[in-house]
Amino acid sequence: MSEDIRKNFASDNVTPVCSEVMEALSRVNHGGVPSYGEDTFSKTLKTRFGEVFEAEVEVFPVATGTAANSLALSAMVAPHGGILCDQSAHINSDEGGAPEFFTHGAKLVGIPSAQGQMDPATLPSTLVQNAEKGILAPPFQALSLTQATEWGTTYSCDALSQLSSTAHEHGLTVHLDGARLGNAIAHLGCSPAETTWKAGVDVLSFGGTKAGAMAAEAVVFFLNDRTRPLLNAMPHLRKRAGHTWSKHRFLSAQLLALLDNELWLTNAHHANMMSQRLVQALKRHPAAHLPFATESNEVFAVLPHPLLQELHDEGYHFYHYPTPEGVPGQLVRFVTSFYTRPDDIDALIDSLTA
Amino acid sequence: MSEDIRKNFASDNVTPVCSEVMEALSRVNHGGVPSYGEDTFSKTLKTRFGEVFEAEVEVFPVATGTAANSLALSAMVAPHGGILCDQSAHINSDEGGAPEFFTHGAKLVGIPSAQGQMDPATLPSTLVQNAEKGILAPPFQALSLTQATEWGTTYSCDALSQLSSTAHEHGLTVHLDGARLGNAIAHLGCSPAETTWKAGVDVLSFGGTKAGAMAAEAVVFFLNDRTRPLLNAMPHLRKRAGHTWSKHRFLSAQLLALLDNELWLTNAHHANMMSQRLVQALKRHPAAHLPFATESNEVFAVLPHPLLQELHDEGYHFYHYPTPEGVPGQLVRFVTSFYTRPDDIDALIDSLTA
Amino acid sequence: MSEDIRKNFASDNVTPVCSEVMEALSRVNHGGVPSYGEDTFSKTLKTRFGEVFEAEVEVFPVATGTAANSLALSAMVAPHGGILCDQSAHINSDEGGAPEFFTHGAKLVGIPSAQGQMDPATLPSTLVQNAEKGILAPPFQALSLTQATEWGTTYSCDALSQLSSTAHEHGLTVHLDGARLGNAIAHLGCSPAETTWKAGVDVLSFGGTKAGAMAAEAVVFFLNDRTRPLLNAMPHLRKRAGHTWSKHRFLSAQLLALLDNELWLTNAHHANMMSQRLVQALKRHPAAHLPFATESNEVFAVLPHPLLQELHDEGYHFYHYPTPEGVPGQLVRFVTSFYTRPDDIDALIDSLTA
Amino acid sequence: MSEDIRKNFASDNVTPVCSEVMEALSRVNHGGVPSYGEDTFSKTLKTRFGEVFEAEVEVFPVATGTAANSLALSAMVAPHGGILCDQSAHINSDEGGAPEFFTHGAKLVGIPSAQGQMDPATLPSTLVQNAEKGILAPPFQALSLTQATEWGTTYSCDALSQLSSTAHEHGLTVHLDGARLGNAIAHLGCSPAETTWKAGVDVLSFGGTKAGAMAAEAVVFFLNDRTRPLLNAMPHLRKRAGHTWSKHRFLSAQLLALLDNELWLTNAHHANMMSQRLVQALKRHPAAHLPFATESNEVFAVLPHPLLQELHDEGYHFYHYPTPEGVPGQLVRFVTSFYTRPDDIDALIDSLTA
């Protein structure tokens, strides 16, 4: 696989680390400090996240999104419990069974949907039917939502609130996979609080890596009566999974850099602009079909096979997805990032329309 | 806890990242490259480790030593199996149950010893007795050794060979926890190959973080008939534990920097020199007792409580250990590193002898 | 819930133990014999199953079907692996997460189907698509089929062979949940061998409890190159799950009694006759709809709500199933058994047609 | 291995089922009753255990002692937690890793002792030292005691109370492995309540199989503020482990038969008498050494190798134990039961003293 730096739209994790994060790593690189998160940088995290989310929080940084999601769920769900999510959810489809590993085999149940979004209208009956199975089905203990979704759409804050409210009524806690939360916020124009705890989210996987970090995500607990009892186990769960860095300051520094001056949102806004630039061109393209609204930094399009082959031959990277029968063409995804330049998009558009 | 940079002897993980590693991180920070280890930096790793260890290897980097040890064991041992180790082994005593987590509850059996070293003479009967228990005891499937040991001593290559040979005869594979392997090699004056696969080690946890990295260790498989069947599972096991970085080049770059110009051994040699500097002073100290030979970068000493209190008051950091009854004083540990300066040791000696 | 003995069609596990099994339990109840399966009764099991299935086998009895299925799968699939099955499969829908527990979180993937039967035509592409996801999806290691299926239909031996053959080509082993295997055999008129190993089944969960035992099922390994490597772990896996009876003869005696004189098949044949007796009446019933072919001892019918209410009021027990929207009535299930008398069916028919 | 019925002293699980239990099984063998414990026999269990133990209880029957112990612990301890027990405890030494399986890798820590009894005097410091390790050690969440112990001794009710009290002060719940609880009660002359919840026990594994059942044990929760929060999970945990019998009445009937007329205690008393009969002879035997007080139905003796060989040649069965160096002879165990006759003991004594 070539590494042509400007033609790689495979994912927002093919990017380098943004300069502000690299500088932050250098800044904390002096002196002997307590390990395992007892350093002053790490202790600042909680305060900074609290400010950004306007809430009382506890924060547990880890290096990968898979770890963040799985660790969060392992604190929320007993091994004999169930987790309800959209069928397309990353935890269900793309994490190699990590949630099952961390939760010791809790059962993930993925509900099919059109746009990667769970339906507030059908959630109550899903929960009731499962509960009626008694010991024959693992009892649902968490609802996991994704914002922005895997198909690049975003939940409205209202939809999130309805889903969370139903979940809470049935005794579930609510997890939000926020690998691309910044992109959703940039699209929605809401505050970080509005699309998380104010919409009923209990535990957030805050994505840092795709937003510009090297390897930094955070499990953020919004403190309330549902989450407080879960906190005691967290330091043990994180250590037991090998996700507590000894030189912990270097994990914290990345996250602090992203929060400073709203870098994570600025980066997300830029990525979204780049995806819209591509979308505008695709909408005018006679052979392109956009199956989903583009509400973050992922552009899904059905394109003719010969055109895709040409792109590939030019060195472009992008993902292919199983395409429903009868659709003329191939479903593919282009992902933009803080690192994408307008010129990169324009070059891609040129290739698409040549 | 104060963060006085020169008085922290608590561990070799309180240190910063050595400059060569930081520079390597900057060097790879450009362009979009394939994620999850498919980049060219990561692909170099296998070759470089092969050269350093003079063997055919497969290498799986992770961010923490706990992850490296536990991941290695999870490939070597079935959930219903057993792992034999020294009672003092880090996997048994200091990793918060991570090996049990990764192996799905394989049973760790820790054998008491004097110096943190398993005894080649008694290993055969231990293995036979366990096998005779049939289904009542988990069958041992791995022997895990630590080099340098948790008490700062090192196994001779001969002792390792005897232990490994017995293990292999009984169908066990051999794991080496090499969090401080460089320090052991620097002490023994042997080659990396001699204290690993040539002494029967099948799978190595190669320690990078304590040697100067930010967060980088590697599970190294020395290819042979015992290890080849274990390889297929590894990429899945690593991903499932959330330990496969998407921006994988930044994990690989740290390890490559340590191997370049034998930086890991140079750093280890320096750390050992610093510990010997302290040992020489303690040996002359009328109130100090050194219970173990200092054969790496950890100095264990029994010292009078008042003296330790004074050190503490001066801002020194070091670990306390449960001290056997009847011993006059307190068992403590001072750890040196690549970052320790001779002046730091001399200042500590001054305080000890004031 | 009333316990009216002749009106309970809820399941074939509401029945008593058939007299031949009770007598067998009494017969072995004398003397001190070795525990944990080393007694002579238990040692006979392997031979007897080998005769019945015309194959070389290893047999591991347990008390419940959930244990048999889950234990079998835990020997066939690594924790990081995947299990493919029909969405309706008992392992996926009715065992409270037991397969996930025994396999340490292996991922069950249930494929939707019309009649509870996997489609040989689409299996290859399902396997290929999953493999292409690499580390993002647990690799499938077992295909689990159910005979008779959860909807009371049976696979033809040809269909089983095609599915197994595809599975083997892709490196999966094949498990058959045979909780109602006798009923399927009685329907198909084939031999036990033909619908199991001759059709590619590697490991069978042989159902005893629903066939007349107190609490006895067996995991049966048909010895071949795929299954032999799995055998060593089995005694440990069974003990570790607490499913190795100390007074093991009482588990074995139940199974031996079922095999003697083909009692399991005689009982199954009787149960099937009783379900056909009911089916004939329902086919003539103007308000009844039979959504599935009745090919075992389970009769599924859509019936009007008022009629079902009347049955319920008369003391009848039967299961309700979620009924697709637009279907006029309620989907219910009546299960017959060795214990059902023609009179019981006729009384039920009278009530249905009154 | 021969099956000479009167010479098998290997264990109390080599025995048949006592006649009262067999009759009870026949008595409940009629009619269709609700499965999974919803039958009237099963519903009686809770009341009957409550009467016997003079307490409010919840009862979960299972078929094996390994399942009872492991299931109890899995409700008491999180996967990241620790379990403290005597090194000789069955859960630590003889259950093939079942507690690790059921608890998803909770760490069992076995403390060495002389007589199989934990020391109330050292328990506090053990608990404190572990807590001080923070995330480096799994936090202890349960104390597991065995009554009678694995070495045939019994805890006084006072000792149990002290241990429980310390455990509770440190936030642990207390589990009692009562595989031979009846034998301990028969020895102590106390009530079932006095040696369980009145001595601080929270959860009991009540042993039925060794007391005369076919395959029946019970996890008994003594309701209090520590145990009530654990109850909700239990039906799910039991089902998930495949230990919920569908024809549940046959599990319950065994336990009810043991409780009726104090059969379990009568059987235990008889077994104890038989062991004392043997002990009296051994005490007079010039070459025998009894290392432990015989306070239940297990007799441990060090005997000369030639004598043991003669017993073996005569067809006797008994267990050998690793014998400490320097002890002249071999440590062996003779176990008596409800089924042992005085004549059997006398014949053994004759052989020992011939």
Image (cartoon, coloured by chain):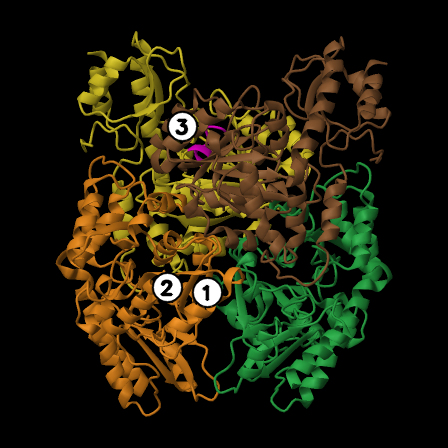
Chain colours: A brown, B green, C yellow, D orange
Spatial CA distance of label 2 from label 1 is: 9 Å
The amino acid on which the numbered mark 2 sits, given as a three-letter code, is His
Question: What kind of element bears circle 2?
Answer: loop
Question: What residue is disc 1 on?
Answer: D131
Of the 4 image quadrants, the one containing the N terminus of chain D is bottom left
Question: What residue is disc 2 on?
Answer: D170
The amino acid on which the numbered mark 1 sits, given as a three-letter code, is Ala
Up/down of C259 relative to B301, above or below: above
Q: Chain of mark 1?
A: D
Spatial CA distance of label 3 from label 1 is: 39 Å
What residue is rendered at 20% in x and 32% in y? C1
Q: Residues within 10 Å of mark 2 (few under 14, many from 20)?
A: some
What residue is rendered at 52% in x and 86% in y? B327
Q: Residues within 10 Å of mark 3 (few under 14, many from 20)?
A: some
Q: Chain of mark 3?
A: A
Q: Residues at badges 2 and 1 in contact (C-beta under 8 Å)?
A: yes
In percent of width and height, residue D124 lies at 38, 71
Q: Nearer the viewer, residue A333 or D92?
A: A333
Question: What kind of element bears circle 1?
Answer: helix
Spatial CA distance of label 3 from label 2 is: 38 Å
Residue A77 visible somewhere in the drawing: yes
Residue B144 position by quadrant? bottom right
Please tell me whether residue B327 belongs to the stretch shown in magenta. no
Q: Left of B259 or right of it: where is D66?
A: left
In percent of width and height, residue B8 lies at 65, 69
Question: What residue is disc 3 on?
Answer: A166
Q: Left of B139 or right of it: where is D301?
A: left
Q: Residues at badges 3 and 1 in contact (C-beta under 8 Å)?
A: no
The residue stretch that appears in magenta = C87-93
